[in-house]
Image (cartoon, helix red, strand yellow):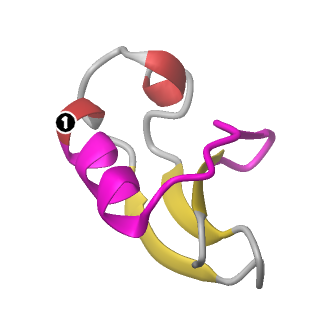
Amino acid sequence: MKTYDIIFNDDFNSNNKGFRETFEYCRNWIAIHNGSNYSYFADYKGGTVSIICNESEEYIHIEEVI
């Protein structure tokens, strides 16, 4: 079973959450928190939040932090 993590990026920094969760969990987590000041969302407004596969390191989903 593949696991996924969440990564925040902008022009200067990058942080990950360290998750080993399902894609659905990560997608829902972003949907709930994007647009808030929760976790890294406040620091990365205007940057991106992505879901990455832990096993292949492939970016599966990318969206702007609002």
**Residue sitting farthest toward the front:** 1
Q: Quadrant of residue 38?
A: top left
Which residue is rendered at x = 40% and y = 67% of the image? 23
Say what secondary structure mark 1 lies in. Answer: helix
Rendered location of residue 64, percent (x, y): 38, 55
Classify the position of the C terminus by image quarter.
top left
**Between 20 and 59, which is closer to the camera in this rendering?**
20
15 with respect to 5 (left or right)? right
50 with respect to 7 (left or right)? left
Which residue is rendered at x = 57% and y = 63% of the image? 4
Rendered location of residue 51, percent (x, y): 52, 64
Across the whole image, how many numbered discs are drawn on residues?
A: 1
Which residue is rendered at x = 26% and y = 21% of the image? 36
**Between 59 and 11, which is closer to the camera in this rendering?**
59
Classify the position of the N terminus by image quarter.
bottom right
Which residue is rendered at x = 19% and y = 36% of the image? 32
Residue 26 included in the magenta stretch of the image: yes
Rendered location of residue 24, percent (x, y): 30, 63
**Between 8 and 54, which is closer to the camera in this rendering?**
54
Amino acid type, residue under disc 1 in the picture: Ile
**Residue sitting farthest toward the left:** 32
Residue 10 included in the magenta stretch of the image: yes
Mark 1 surroundings: few (<14), some (14-19) or many (≥20) residues within 10 A: few
Residue 1, compared with residue 63, is above or below; it is below
Residue 23, compared with residue 25, is above or below; it is below
Residue 50, compared with residue 62, is above or below; it is above
32 with respect to 25 (left or right)? left
Q: Which residue is mark 1?
A: 32
The magenta region covers 9-31
**Between 8 and 56, which is closer to the camera in this rendering?**
56
